[in-house]
Image: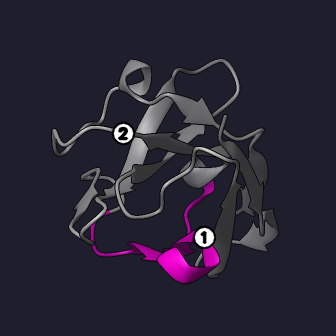
Amino acid sequence: QVQLVESGGGLVQAGDSLRLSCAASGRTFSTYTMAMAWFRQAPGEERDFVAAISSGGSTYYADSVKGRFTISRDNAKKTVYLQMNSLKPEGTAVYYCAARSGSSWPRIVRGEYECWGQGTQVTVSS
């Protein structure tokens, strides 16, 4: 079982930056083979893909965040990060970390991820 714990959310103003962290743990977790991703869910909306990073460090982004968000990982620390710059009010959502095994890349569908964190709230005021 893999456990994922997000942190770093908060209330910011439009244009500000924020960095989210996702710490992974668990007996079966393998930092070297699992792809990681961030999704977000606004009130009343679906949980949407934001960014993903493969075990080898390849990255993939939703068009809405490309150029503003950066996903990275530190395998030694079993942690994945999401650096969010130039935040917009429409970025207000609960941000979730997710993990999946397997080699198919990239995967942006929620159902393709096996493990999820509890989420961290990001609120962007205008």
Tell me which residue sits at (36%, 24%) in the image. Answer: 112
| Image quarter (top left, top right, bottom left or bottom right) of the N terminus | top right
Q: Is residue 121 left or right of residue 59?
A: right
Q: Does residue 48 appear in this view?
A: yes
Q: Secondary structure at mark 2?
A: loop
From the viewer's perspective, is residue 104 above or below residue 6?
A: above
Mark 1 or 2: in front is 2
- Residue 107 has which mark? none
Count of numbered circles on the image: 2
**Could you tell me residue 88's position as x and y percent?**
55, 62
Given the image, on which type of amino acid does mark 2 rest?
Ser
Q: Does residue 85 appear in this view?
A: no
Which picture quadrant has residue 52?
A: bottom left
**Could you tell me residue 105's position as x and y percent?**
16, 45
Which picture quadrant has residue 71?
A: bottom left
Q: Which residue is mark 2?
A: 101
Tell me which residue sits at (29%, 50%) in the image. Answer: 62
Front-most of 13 and 72? 72
Evaluate if marks 1 and 2 touch, with contact meaning CB atoms under 8 Å apart.
Answer: no
Given the image, on which type of amino acid does mark 1 rest?
Thr
| Image quarter (top left, top right, bottom left or bottom right) of the C terminus | bottom right
Q: Which residue is mark 1?
A: 79
Front-most of 45 and 107? 107
Tell me which residue sits at (34%, 55%) in the image. Answer: 33
Tell me which residue sits at (78%, 63%) in the image. Answer: 9
Give the Cα separation between the discs numbered 1 and 2: 16 Å
Q: Is residue 20 left or right of residue 46?
A: right
Q: Secondary structure at mark 1?
A: strand
**What is the magenta range?**
66-89
How is the rendered protein coloured? one colour
